[in-house]
Amino acid sequence: MLRVEEVQSVEFSSALISKFDEIVSRYPEGRSKSALLPILHEVQAVYGWLSSAAMDKVAEYLNIQPIEVYEVATFYTMFFLKPQGKYVLEVCRTGPCCLVGAEKIMDYIGQKLGVKEGEVTADGLFSYRGVECLAACGYAPVLQIGPEYTFYENLTPESVDQLIENLKNK
Amino acid sequence: MGRKLLLEHINVPGINTFQVYKEKGGYRAVEKALKTMSSDDVVEEVKKSGLRGRGGAGFPTGMKWSFLAKPEGVPRYLVCNADESEPGTFKDRYLMTHIPHALIEGMIVGSYALGANTSYIYVRGEMMPQIRILEKAIAEAKAAGYLGKNILGSGYDLEIYVQPGGGAYICGEETALLESLEGKRGNPRIKPPFPAIAGLYGCPTVVNNVESIAATVPIVNEGGEEYAKIGIGRSTGTKLISASGNINKPGVYEIELGLSVEDFIYSDEYCGGIANGKRLKAVVAGGSSVPILPANLILNLANGDKRLMSYESLSEGGFATGTMLGSGGFVVLDEDQCIVRNTWNFSRFYHHESCGQCSPCREGTGWMEKVLHRLEYGHGKMSDIDLLVDVSKKIEGNTICPLGDAAAWPVASAIRHFRDEFEWHVKEPKLALERNYGLAHYADPIKIAEEV
């Protein structure tokens, strides 16, 4: 279900717009809609999530209907439709990771952060969620953190402690 | 030691850079193809090689290339499927991370063979670091004159772009991938028309897996006939296998097709045996979509002969006693793993990833997940087991794309081979929550023989 969070209008920076222009140049004339996913990634990297105002602005830039942006943003799991913690710990919860303890790691992260899956910690720094197979089964359990999607592999409670500590001090 | 064609130089420091890759013999295939071969010659070599699609379906790559329509004045596209999302599969990530130029070189060779002047590598969005690596590799190749206008003075022009996905397993299906590349939801298209006729932007398009494209490099270098000498029967060449689960040495291994499954699991060159001194219970041999097999059937065929790592041997016996090579995602389960839980987990995955277009898949995957959940959590009924089989049969073959089949097979095969473990969950729900069923009679025949 789409519940679009209301925010005031957004203005994309000129640097972001030139990035969009470069992305659009990768496709043939008249096919600029192909730029939609890469552009949404760029927008999310800047704002942390996709507000309806930001999506409308993307639609305006690409000269497509806002619904064409919404339907894509709601289909793909990487796009956040509401504000998240500064660091979203995305833990793989699929079969191969679970064979070597991913479920325990996810429970541990929940306890450690003191929030439920999808909630944001009071300091606004962290949220976590289970995601489907991240194609890193040989280094399981694994988690990733956007927008760079840095990978943390072979997780143990100790390495999770260390990771959270490092992020707090960043 | 088996021959290594893709990972031969994996441990060379700096092999991720253009310079070192070239010093180690890289980009010879581009030189050879562009300077001495026609595009049809390249297609012919790939046909002769017997290379089969490494993404999972196993369709002969050369044949796929030869189907490409070539109407006058219409652009053609090569699109690389790097949306690696099949649970248990992580070989493409490995290849792109460590030897990105192997893919770029293959893209140039493939694009030349198909007459494409613009090609895309569709990488799953979560692989942002690999996207950066590929973009850097493309820039290096371009600076060296291997991409862009008039490559090596041949008159051939090519640009390669990297496209990020958005986190959707379904985009590994080639027509969903093309939809996604066009900036839409990843809903698979009805075929025909096939992409070879009407693919990206309605133009003739070939979609190939990362490993298939990289494999064309040694094929061009050594010739299709030489490549076909490696392997066994119609399973030619080498294959990257992603090994995970309860083994001593998880990782990506390049094997010559035809290696025995037993050697792959137990030899120190590969998986190094089952972790923590446990015994083998089951294997999902080709990514989560293929049927799970108990230890006795993965190690041996029904007639007792050794099972081999090849397309034919893994599928020997059909789904009654066999499975598939698939993407080469080799997931090993030890005696402590619960088949019901593992099946529920995979069902949740398919329910989550169904695009929702076809009712049997959209609804059926959800039903299977729910029924498996209640079996796992002690609320199951004996009739649930046949209900699962029934639902799986009603999904299989009744959907636009193969995701429906991929969701049905793991459930059907788990019940086929481990029905008593499902029944035990119904009969002993409290016990099933506390402990696992163990090996029962699915024990690893090798280790049992030693104990006796």
Image (tube, helix red, strand yellow):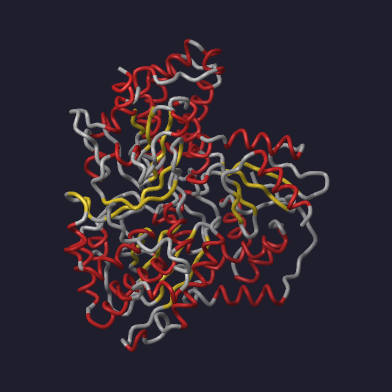
Question: Which residue ends up furthest to the bottom in the rendered image?
Answer: B153
Residue A105 horizontal/vertical position (percent)? 63, 37
A165 displayed left or right of B362 = right
Q: Quadrant of the C terminus of chain B?
A: top left
Residue located 50% across and 17% down the image: B380
B179 displayed left or right of B270 = right
Residue B53 or residue B201, whichever sits in front:
B53
Q: Is residue B181 above or below residue B376?
A: below
Q: Is residue B67 above or below residue B354?
A: below
Residue located 22% across and 81% down the image: B36
A143 displayed left or right of B92 = right
Residue A56 or residue B133, whichever sits in front:
B133
Residue B149 horizontal/vertical position (percent)? 40, 86
Residue A122 or residue B389, whichever sits in front:
A122
Residue A154 horizontal/vertical position (percent)? 57, 44
Give residue B450's quadrant in the image. Answer: top left
- The answer to whether residue B115 is seen in the rendering is no
